[in-house]
Image: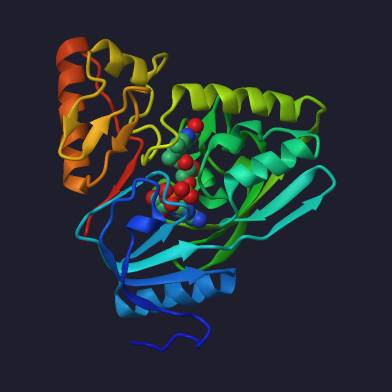
Amino acid sequence: MADLTSCLELKRDLLLAPYTTFGIGGPAKYAVIVRTASEMEELLNWARLGGERTLIIGRGSNLLLDQRGFDGLAIINRMEWCRAVSTQIEVGAGYSFALLGVRAARSGFSGLEFAAGIPGSVGGAVFMNAGAGGQETAEHLVDVEVLTLAGNRMRLAREELNFSYRTSPFQTDGSIVLSATFQLKPSDRARDEQLISLRNRSASQPLQEKSAGCIFRNPPGRAAGKIIDECGLKGRMIGGAQVSYKHGNFIVNSGAATSSDVLSLIAHLKEEVLRLSGIFLEEEVRYIPYC
Ligand SMILES: Cc1cc2nc3c(=O)[nH]c(=O)nc-3n(C[C@H](O)[C@H](O)[C@H](O)COP(=O)(O)OP(=O)(O)OC[C@H]3O[C@@H](n4cnc5c(N)ncnc54)[C@H](O)[C@@H]3O)c2cc1C
């Protein structure tokens, strides 16, 4: 196996649970925190040469990691720089998406108000095309800098990229998001609107509990949480995993939940919802198997 440069500290058997909002996940064979794009390039090259699987972890807020861990290289993205030029803002993929939303709105710019309630990284938000309240990440993107599976670094304009509801091209082509540029509009109401939406969120979502946000995508024209509620499934529990009483689309880790508990509860909810309402629910949360 090739050597890494001395400034990259490769850890063996690092427990991944603390790097996720669910608080679930066993140890990674290798794990490393990256702070620059060149470190990311070097690591991917190293993994490719050694035949290691890789997993990028942003803030781990849409991830269900296996309790046995990850048999490969987990790359924890902390490329956290941020540069504003006029009405555009360019950010490293490891930057907090919530912080970006707050900074933009506080500086009097509209476009990323919704981001304040999303506890992910910029890279994770682009990868998931995260959204809320009618806004989504792709809407205000100017371009994205990526590292392709083949190891090429390139900047892609928004027009070249096909985004849709909670879907980005990177979910299928395997590229890593290194940075993104957003176009914002001046607004003197952005922060007030953001605060209203944050208050609504804390009234309707179990934000004090460990979760990965919404487990299922919303079927067209419907809210998955409402469907689960109408099927009488709020509070349903398997092991340490429970459907939140506050929001039907959240599964919370009530203490010692394992990935198997969560997967069993997901399967149960899908089965019951299909039986009771004829609706097929599809996962939004990304399950990462051990190998
Ligand atoms: C309380 C709570 C509320 C939430 N509310 C919302 C909401 O309103 N709307 C919404 O859309 N989501 C919401 N989420 C889900 C989650 O925050 C978003 O999907 C977020 O965009 C995920 O970002 P992340 O950095 O945490 O990604 P992670 O969970 O770390 O990773 C998710 C996926 O993205 C990949 N990935 C991460 N970074 C990169 C990168 N740089 N390049 C390539 N791939 C990458 C990972 O490999 C993984 O497959 C919520 C979650 C929680 C816990």
Q: Quadrant of residue 31?
A: bottom left
Relative side of 248 to 149, left or right: left
In the displayed structure, 81 sits above or below 267; it is below
In the displayed structure, 68 sits above or below 287; it is below
In the displayed structure, 253 sits above or below 34; it is above
Q: Nearer the viewer, residue 208 or 14?
A: 208
Q: Nearer the viewer, residue 42 or 197?
A: 197
Q: Quadrant of ligand 1?
A: top left
Q: Residue at x 18, y 18 (%)?
A: 274
Query: In which quadrant will I find the C terminus?
Result: bottom left
| Residue that sits furthest to the right in the current view | 86
Measuring from the top left, give residue 98's x and y in whole percent: 59, 42
Measuring from the top left, give residue 272's x and y in whole percent: 16, 20
Q: Residue at x 57, y 56 (%)?
A: 93
Query: In which quadrant will I find the N terminus?
Result: bottom left
Q: Quadrant of residue 102?
A: top right
